[in-house]
Image (cartoon, grey):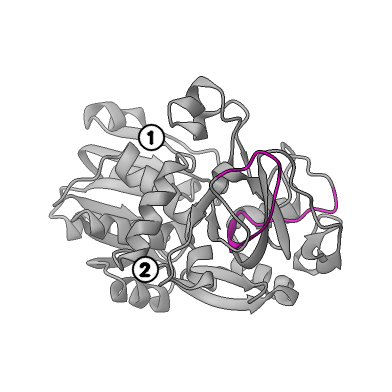
Amino acid sequence: MLAALFRRHGGPEVMEVGEVPTPVPGPGQVLVKVRAAALNHIDIWLRRGLPALKVALPHIAGGDVCGTVAGLGSGVRGAKEGDRVVLNPGLSCGRCPSCLDGRDNFCPEYKMLGEHAWGGEAEYVVVPAANLVPAPTGASDTDLAAVPTAYITAWQMLVDRAAVRQGETVLIIAAGSGVGTAALQIAKLHGARVIATASTARKLEAARAHGADETINHAETDLVAEVKRLTGRRGVDIVVEHAGGAAFEKSVVACARGGRIVTCGATAGHEVTLNLRHVFWRQISVLGSTLASKSRLFTIVDLVAAGRLSPIVASVLPLGDIGQAHRMLEAREAFGKVVLRVSS
């Protein structure tokens, strides 16, 4: 099969489309013919190389996939060839207490498709049958590929961890990212007021077009001062934070009393200075979050099918333009997801 891959670490120029053996599904696994696959920021980190995660080379990234079932391993039930599906990106053992409790993202063996195993930026991918979610007929392949990682991450952050409530104010840092655009929609779905930040006027305009009540250009203005102005000095109830670095430190000060900061990433730096006086005196909660239980994707796909959530796709490129896709993601040009069209 053809696959977008890298054989060595480096810049976007190391990305290529090459031929590799088509994977064969084992017991309990399914072979999926990929129609569309979306990129995530982890693709960039994997390509550059991560000291704590050594991947075998060549490596195929891609955790977000929409496709059709093309083959079944032994023992698979509830799926048949030709079924159109969306893939859950989380891989877990399925037998530990966390998995059996519906908290598979707490599994000691938890891994990610496209990170710890070959992913879906290829003509075919193999996944456990438990990772299949039926694809609704009314949504396109590219829209559905834009859903899994961003939306389950944002859902767990806002709904499961921060327990967003109607009427609360939510600050979304870097609202043009995949997680940011998903969080914007999920916050509005739950009746929250949204303040979205971005670094360009174009992204801020797009955020308002997709439901943001207020916007802040965090590259040109003081984030905390603007939040205080927009909230009458009160601060926000929830901060959706996935950048780390200076953004995290400002998020603490931007919180209201009893506010919650929920974080899922550290693209701008993983070491921060935390003033504990802000945390204990104003009773702020700092919450970590990684992806979500597999069950959440079923809920989200149903909401997409009902038109209550609308994946935002910034650009659709052919598989052969994988280098350009990486450059777009790395330059932070896109508002929403960059998606690869693999087959029809």
Percent coordinates x, y for residue 135 in the rendering: 47, 62
* Residue type highlighted by circle 1: Leu
Position of 137 with respect to 309 (left or right) is right
The answer to whether the residues at label 2 and label 1 have Cβ atoms under 8 Å apart is no
Q: Earlier in the sequence, mark 2 or mark 1?
A: 1
Give me the disc on residue 310.
2
Secondary structure found at label 1: strand
The structure residue drawn at horizontal position 49% and vertical position 65%, both measured from the top left corner, is 144
Number of marks in the rendered image: 2
Give the residue displayed 66% in from the left and 56% down from the top.
43
Going by the numbered disc 2, the residue's amino acid type is: Ser
Between 139 and 176, the residue placed more toward the observer is 139
- In the picture, the quarter occupied by the N terminus is bottom right
**Vertically, is 193 above or below 142?**
above
Residue 154 vs residue 210: left or right?
right
* Residue 249 visible in this rendered orientation of the protein: no
- Please tell me which residue lies in front, 12 or 19: 19
Is 64 one of the magenta-colored residues? yes
Span highlighted in magenta in the image: 57-77
Within the magenta stretch, is there residue 63?
Answer: yes
Q: Position of residue 52 (x, y in %)?
A: 72, 36
